[in-house]
Image: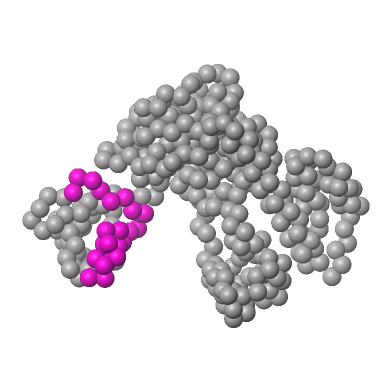
């Protein structure tokens, strides 16, 4: 099928060829993707443009990283049960929040880009610690190198969860749209699960496809994509509907999937704002510190589970596991041999009566005490 490209496409292509900087090339490529018709005849062209865009953004990120290499690093070593990135526009209240919830003392000022490097702090919530990291401010175009460049996005990619810090007194909906767009452009998918696709590269055996009917473009589209990436031996298993772009992102490892929630600051200046911020869970950051800590921990999708031996007191330090975990998961977290030998389980907390015997796949709740029997 012919591509039938409009005249505007060729003008944009000329701008790309004349571009002298990475930023100009990125903008021109984005324009080419936007202008190109979306039909079967342009599928290959669009994939090529998207690969080019990913490569250019990678070069930009690498350049920013090298620049940063001459000074302090943006990397923050993970500590505690989870690392949460505080991401917001300039003067959204990130530093004030970090001071409120941790012992960290970042500079607080009323001018933009006060924070120029990630600032970590440990939030103590009951018997666990959560690491909060204030990320230097994003701006519209951060993914293209504007503001402090792409390094803040790289720091956010490494976190376990994203907290979008939004100022309720200054068009919060637009702030949210900018943050989500920049994070998406930086390869961070919010509140989405990774697609159920397995790509296992092998040394021989050719290409084996399972579930190809679930991929937009079918078998031929997958095979062409693998050839373009010089993959000649692989097992590809697809268990849900995906498009070729998603498949390509998985091949390149260019995206991460992170849970996300909104911390709404300055709500005293604009009450009633939380209801209009789309699908995200919104937490009023003006709450008392202990309430705010509890809500943040709940937003991480984690539970605390305390283990005990028969006729002994429960452990003081909990295991921190994903919500929905079972006694089998507790046993695995302790030792894989214990999981294999697990025969019976007693639970205190969420059960109908204390010390109730439960199945090994019983869904545990935050604060449960578990006694494992082999």
Considering only vertical position in the picture, is 265 above or below 220? Answer: above
Foreground of the two, 221 or 298: 221
Region rendered in magenta = 315-341
Residue 197 position in % (x across, y down): 54, 67
Q: How is the image coloured?
A: one colour
Quadrant of residue 176 in the image? top right
Farthest residue in the left direction?
311
Considering only vertical position in the picture, is 340 above or below 16? Answer: below
Give me the residue at 36% from left, 54% from top.
Answer: 322
Q: Which quadrant: the C terminus?
A: bottom left
Give me the residue at 52% from left, 53% from top.
Answer: 257
Farthest residue in the top direction?
110
Quadrant of residue 316 in the image? top left
Q: Which quadrant: the N terminus?
A: bottom right
| Image position of 109 (left or right of 354) | right
Foreground of the two, 61 or 243: 61
Residue 128 position in % (x across, y down): 30, 41
Farthest residue in the right direction?
7
Farthest residue in the bottom direction?
205
């Amino acid at each position: 099928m012919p591509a039938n490209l409009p005249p505007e496409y060729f003008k944009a292509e000329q701008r790309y060829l004349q571009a002298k900087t990475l930023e100009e090339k990125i903008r021109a490529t984005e324009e080419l993707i936007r202008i190109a018709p979306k039909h079967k005849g342009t599928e290959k062209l669009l994939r090529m443009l998207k690969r080019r865009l990913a490569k250019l953004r990678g070069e930009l990120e690498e350049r920013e990283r090298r620049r940063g290499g001459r000074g302090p690093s943006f990397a923050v070593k993970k500590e505690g049960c989870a690392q949460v990135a505080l991401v917001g526009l300039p003067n959204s209240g990130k530093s004030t929040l970090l001071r409120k919830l941790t012992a960290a003392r970042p500079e607080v000022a009323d001018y933009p880009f006060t924070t120029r490097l990630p600032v970590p702090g440990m939030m103590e919530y009951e018997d666990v610690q959560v690491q909060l990291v204030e990320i230097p401010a994003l701006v519209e175009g951060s993914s293209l190198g504007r503001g402090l460049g792409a390094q803040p996005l790289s720091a956010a990619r490494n976190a376990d969860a994203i907290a979008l810090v939004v100022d309720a007194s200054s068009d919060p909906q637009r702030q949210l749209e900018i943050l989500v767009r920049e994070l998406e452009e930086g390869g961070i998918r919010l509140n989405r699960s990774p697609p159920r696709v397995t790509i296992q590269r092998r040394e021989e055996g050719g290409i084996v496809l399972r579930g190809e009917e679930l991929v937009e473009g079918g078998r031929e589209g997958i095979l062409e994509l693998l050839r373009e990436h010089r993959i000649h031996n692989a097992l590809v298993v697809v268990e849900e509907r995906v498009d070729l772009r998603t498949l390509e992102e998985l091949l390149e490892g260019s995206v991460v999937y992170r849970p996300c929630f909104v911390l709404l600051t300055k709500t005293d200046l604009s009450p009633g704002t939380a209801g209009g911020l789309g699908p995200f869970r919104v937490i009023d950051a003006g709450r008392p510190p202990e309430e705010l800590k509890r809500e943040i921990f709940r937003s991480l999708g984690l539970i605390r589970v305390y283990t005990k031996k028969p006729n002994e007191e429960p452990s003081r330090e909990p295991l921190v596991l994903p919500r929905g975990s079972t006694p089998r998961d507790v046993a695995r977290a302790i030792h894989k041999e214990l999981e294999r030998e697990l025969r019976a389980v007693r639970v205190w907390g969420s059960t109908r009566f204390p010390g109730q015997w439960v199945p090994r796949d019983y869904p545990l709740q935050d604060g449960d005490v578990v006694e494992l029997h082999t």
